Amino acid sequence: MNQRREPRVQVDQPVEVTVFGLPDVQVRGEIRNVSGRGLGLELKQRLDPGAALKISLEDAFLLGEVIYCHPRGEGWYAGVELEHALYGLFELAAAMREVSEEYSGPERPHAAQHAGRQDEE
């Protein structure tokens, strides 16, 4: 009997995974299924339970923690609990460029510096 709290959707999405540590380690993997709280990740190497991850997608990244990792075929299957997700990175980058271009120009003195000059006059 399936005791999952949320249904899982089957996917086949290649991703770049960063395992945070000293140093960080980059590995390629594939998301096999996803729910609102987690995902199943297939990899060529074992990940330690408790490891913090960043999973990079085309226009998003996900932050999570490895809950379990067991052998599957010639690789490993990791269950990842998701903590945070950031979507729409292309739109965010475009908005930041727009704001940056709007305010770029000659630098103005800091207000405290400007006030000091007024006192000298």
Image (cartoon, rainbow, N blue to C red):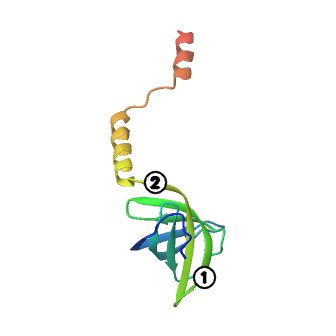
Q: Residue at x 43, y 31 (%)?
A: 107
Does residue 93 appear to the left or right of 73 in the view shown? left
Q: Residue at x 54, y 64 (%)?
A: 5
Question: Is 3 above or below relative to 117?
Answer: below
Residue located beneath label 1 in the image: 70
43 or 35: nearer the viewer = 35
Does residue 98 appear to the left or right of 66 in the view shown? left
- Identified by mark 2, the residue type is Leu
Question: Is 54 above or below relative to 98?
Answer: below
The x and y percentages for residue 41 are 50, 74
The x and y percentages for residue 20 are 61, 65
1 or 42: nearer the viewer = 1
Question: Is 21 above or below relative to 70?
Answer: above
The x and y percentages for residue 67 are 62, 70
| Residue located farthest toward the top when viewing the structure as drawn | 121
Question: Is 93 above or below relative to 38?
Answer: above
Rate crowding at label 1 as few (under 14), some (14 to 19) or many (20 or more) other CA atoms within 10 Å: some
30 or 16: nearer the viewer = 30
Residue located beneath label 2 in the image: 86
